[in-house]
Amino acid sequence: GWSARLPPGEFATTLAAGDDWVAATTSRDLLRIYSGGGVEDAVVGGLGRAVACCAHKRSLAVAYHRSSPTADGQQDVWIQALDVEGRSSVNGDGTRLPLPPGAKLAWLGFKTDDGVLLAKDSSGSFWMLVDDFGWRFAPALDAAAKRVNAGDREWPVFAVHGFVHCALLKGGAPYPPCRGAKPVLERLALRQPHASAAWDATGDGDGWGSRE
């Protein structure tokens, strides 16, 4: 294993690991990329205070605050998708996540089969990043509408083949129990994007990096 020491006064705020690299956003609004052996490969400025990040193979997604919340509590969260190996941005400075007032980003992850990016907000809505009208988030699932008990919540674990697999949190618990029986995962179907918005990730699941 290896470790990396940040400059004095700087600390990591989010972390994600890809195929053979690790990414960290830091308190100095920097994005740092390290090789699988721990060598720092890139240091670039961020686009705002990082909220979350996730990785899949060669793809990295970073969610950040572009501005302060509005008076009615609507957060201004944008998500930028990066091709780390290609050292490029997929969707420019990012795509705005259409959070309803009072909602927060609750989960961010890539589908493991095709590398499509998903986001879940605290109201129970899942969103899918699609190449339609210039990279927008499209509704993928309203999990709240499928709940048997209104107080329950979903804890996403992974998404694959058109489904997101979640642990059900009874009574609005903030996270699954650390002890006891392993949570049983529920499989929730994701809405597929329109044919015009779908993009071919190829059979190897490399995601955006495989596009020509």
Image (tube, rainbow, N blue to C red):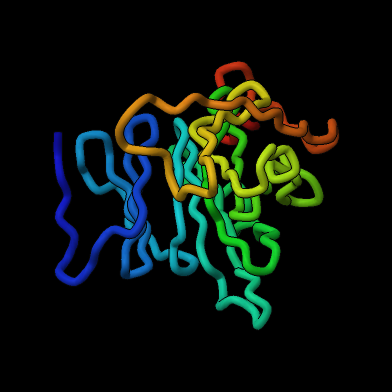
98 horizontally vs 114: left or right: right
Indicate the position of residue 1 as horizontal and vertical percent values: 14, 33
Query: In the rendered image, which quarter is residue 75 located in?
Result: bottom right
Total of numbered circles in the picture?
0
Indicate the position of residue 208 as horizontal and vertical percent values: 59, 35
Indicate the position of residue 44 as horizontal and vertical percent values: 38, 60
Residue drawn 57% across the image and 22% down it = 113
Q: Is residue 47 above or below residue 105?
A: below
Asked if residue 10 shows in the view, the reply is yes
Q: Is residue 172 above or below residue 178?
A: below
145 horizontally vs 61: left or right: right
Q: Is residue 108 above or below residue 195?
A: below
Quadrant holding the C terminus: top right
Indicate the position of residue 21 as horizontal and vertical percent values: 33, 37
Relative to the observer, which residue lies in front, 34 or 121? 121
Residue drawn 24% across the image and 48% down it = 40
Query: In the rendered image, which quarter is residue 187 located in?
Result: top right
Asked if residue 127 shows in the view, the reply is no
Residue drawn 45% across the image and 50% down it = 174
Residue drawn 65% across the image and 71% down it = 74
Relative to the observer, which residue lies in front, 76 or 5? 76
